[in-house]
Image (cartoon, rainbow, N blue to C red):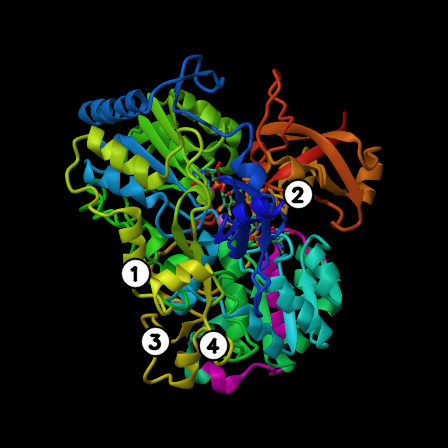
Amino acid sequence: MSEKANSAEQTIMTTCSSHCGGTCILKAHVKDGKVTRIETDDGPDPQFRACLKARAYRQRVYAPDRLQYPLKRVGERGRGQFERVSWDEALQTVASELGRVRKTYGSASVLFLQSGGDVNWLHSYKVIDRLLCMSGGCTRTWGLVSYEGALFSSIASYGEAAACPGRDDLLNSRFILLWGCDPSSSVANTNHIWYLAQAREKGIKIVAVDPRYHDSAAVAAEQWVPIRPGTDAAVLLAMAYVIISEHLQDKRFIDTYTVGFDKYADHVLGKDDGTAKTPAWAETITGIPAATIASLAREFATRKPAALISGIGPGRTAYGEQYHRAATALAAITGNVGVHGGEPAARSWDSIYNGYPFQLGRGISSGGNPVEAGAPPRQYSITGGGARMGTSGARIHITSAPDAILKGKAGGYPADIKLAYLVNINYLNQTANLNKTVEAFKKLEFVVVQEQFMTATAKFADIVLPTNTFFERNDITAGGGTPFYGAMNKIVPSLYESKSHLEIGIALAAKMGLKDFNDKTEEEWLRGIAKAGPFKDYDSFKKEGSYKVPLAEPFVTFKEQIDDPKGHPFPTPSGRIELFCQRLADMHHPEIPPVPKYIEAWEGVNDPLARKYPLQLITTHSRMRAHTQFHNIPWIRELAPHAVTINARDAKARNIKDGDTVRVFNDRGQMALPARVNERIMPGVVEVPQGAWYDPDERGVDKGGCANVLTSDRVSPGGAFTSNTALVQVEKV
Ligand SMILES: Nc1nc2c(c(=O)[nH]1)N[C@H]1C(S)=C(S)[C@@H](COP(=O)(O)OP(=O)(O)OC[C@H]3O[C@@H](n4cnc5c(=O)[nH]c(N)nc54)[C@H](O)[C@@H]3O)O[C@H]1N2
Ligand SMILES: Nc1nc2c(c(=O)[nH]1)N[C@H]1C(S)=C(S)[C@@H](COP(=O)(O)OP(=O)(O)OC[C@H]3O[C@@H](n4cnc5c(=O)[nH]c(N)nc54)[C@H](O)[C@@H]3O)O[C@H]1N2
Ligand SMILES: [Mo]
């Protein structure tokens, strides 16, 4: 390379925060205004090294299928036929449709659907949330697909949703239970798997409880305990049975920090319902041998401190709240909360929206939603440390939006939905029971989608507004469960006619004649948000690209409450960890009991439907994608085919060999994809990783293998998304 060409190359630091929950440092090489290469962190430990997806980001920025211009639907909705229009026409259409629908049906008929995209502070859904709220309001959703079950139970038990300790603290554990958690694939916190690998090297015993022998187990665990999906609460109660009957609980901890141990123990021992939750009882439910349950219980109670990492995957099941409550109770009765090497076993990842463990300044805020003002609270909602709970009765559960569109007020929903505005979400692909969503979206009068690509959802839009990528704008992000701040520096100008979310909001507000929508530039916003951050100054933070917060010791959640219970009570009504939760008792809902219980799931092995559909489907998060993002990137796709994993025994019974194309189906839908046959999944369970792009053929068979053609839109009583509760059949095609 010539000297001249060399000098023209520039490197710019930025941070990837692509909806996997990780935050990873990128060093982009730019030449002649184009990204030529992407490297990652080579700085001091802990390094925040990027995965295959971020390193392939160049192919995303320059993807041939990137949306380049605003689009207007021309064919039937959903067929994906569009024509190019100007920004002016696109925004004018959105503004006038919003006006028309609001005037005809009221503001509650406008549904706002949003999600992560990139997890950052400025260019998020909040821009449009503000726009819709300021212009009359909208119907919003409640229920986090990720971890509503964990949120609900964490607030019941601890009064707080942000409960994830620093993962470097795992090196202080003596025993780690990796429960439904595979951080080698589903990232959530950068370096989680790295600390687990170090823990293993240090000789700390790690046991994985999961229907799959996943890569994290292969790398870090000494033992794999296969478990039938949806039965976790039973084994956790049986572990408590062993601990309580053998007096292994931490009495001092229980007396000082918890309430309701007696009622909880009564249930565990069967004094309240006549069924002792013995290991033998749990064996028949979970498929785990009673002796294994008993030895896990003894090890967990005696090898202290012990970390029960309760993943959120098992919580995305029918009655997932009970699993999370049961996990928390086990951590509490063994005194593993608020101590180094322990784990509150609540929600296994934290949201930066909680500013955990440090605060940044506030970004754009809605200023209040007129549609929610004065609405009564939602039934069975629990309030507390988790502003994102959405306790307003004017909201609709995120999974129920299609049902609400189809049935409206007559079906008991708070509104008749006519228009949907979608930002940073591939709703159709990612929410349960896709075929029902298709029907619902066809019924809407108008749909607007802000997108980078022609997703399954964008195909159902009337207007598509092209958004840029984080390489084309400035932003700030932070580690979910890691003491880290990342500057997201703009690397190149916006491609084609794409715009940032803030630019779209400003332009649309102007079209709608909204005054006072925004008075700051991108930079003014970011400087304001950064002000409260711990770094020296914004300019050096931006230049360096990141700030790794130096901590004297690993962060421990609830340490203050444990060290000083008088001065720092838990933020529950009792000030203690609630093994028995009066707020749940007051709900008088048999499926939201005040102490954790095992409640048998629908679509489990004993459901009569299992005769027709005998296999339990789980839909995991793949390392190949961040949900649907990156599935269209060739460098990623060539690594491995999207496939359904089936146990060799189940495959043999169906004459299926590794690599065969199979049909996976139930009454809700069907897909055709390759089978991966092995023994890394327990018999009776099949896995279709979520996030593959829906691509139906003329008979409605999804060739894309989108998990949600099979999942159910039935919501758990506490709000958990039930994407790991579905029965299916598999056959060779
Ligand atoms: N069956 C099943 N379904 C699931 C799950 C499961 O486990 N099983 N998991 C659920 C969970 S936990 C979640 S969080 C949801 C996620 O569901 P989604 O959030 O809907 O999934 P994403 O693929 O992240 O969709 C974000 C979309 O925003 C678009 N986008 C628009 N603007 C931007 C931008 O500025 N930046 C970025 N990065 N993207 C933008 C992206 O192109 C992408 O299409 O899926 C849920 N669905
Ligand atoms: N690469 C990548 N990383 C991601 C994401 C992504 O799409 N891609 N998504 C991010 C987001 S938004 C989220 S919410 C998180 C999700 O993170 P998780 O929920 O932790 O991820 P999953 O892979 O769905 O589930 C974790 C494990 O739970 C197991 N499991 C499923 N059902 C059960 C059950 O009933 N019992 C037990 N014991 N185990 C069960 C699965 O086999 C899997 O090994 O991941 C985040 N990280
Ligand atoms: Mo999620």
Answer whether labels 4 and 2 touch (C-beta < 8 Å). Answer: no
**Residue 557, image x, y percentages:** 45, 73
Seen as rendered, the residue at the extreme bottom is 252
Q: How far apart are marks 3 and 4 (CA)?
A: 28 Å
Q: How far apart are marks 1 and 2 (CA)?
A: 44 Å
| Amino acid beneath label 2 | Gln
**Residue 58, image x, y percentages:** 56, 41
Residue 90 in sight = yes
According to the image, label 2 marks what residue? 616
Q: What stretch is highlighted in magenta?
A: 226-254
According to the image, label 3 marks what residue? 575
Circle 3 or circle 1, nearest the eye:
1
Left or right position of 34 against 405: right
Q: Residue 361 carries which label?
A: 1
Answer whether labels 3 and 1 touch (C-beta < 8 Å). Answer: no
Q: Earlier in the sequence, mark 3 or mark 4?
A: 4
Q: In the depicted view, which residue is nearer to us: 254 or 692?
A: 692
State whether label 3 is within 8 Å of ligand 2: no
Q: Distance between the residues labelled 3 and 2?
A: 40 Å
| Amino acid beneath label 1 | Gly
Residue 317 in sight = no
Q: Distance between the residues labelled 4 and 2?
A: 44 Å
Residue visible at 65% across and 81% down? 303
- Which SS class for mark 2? strand
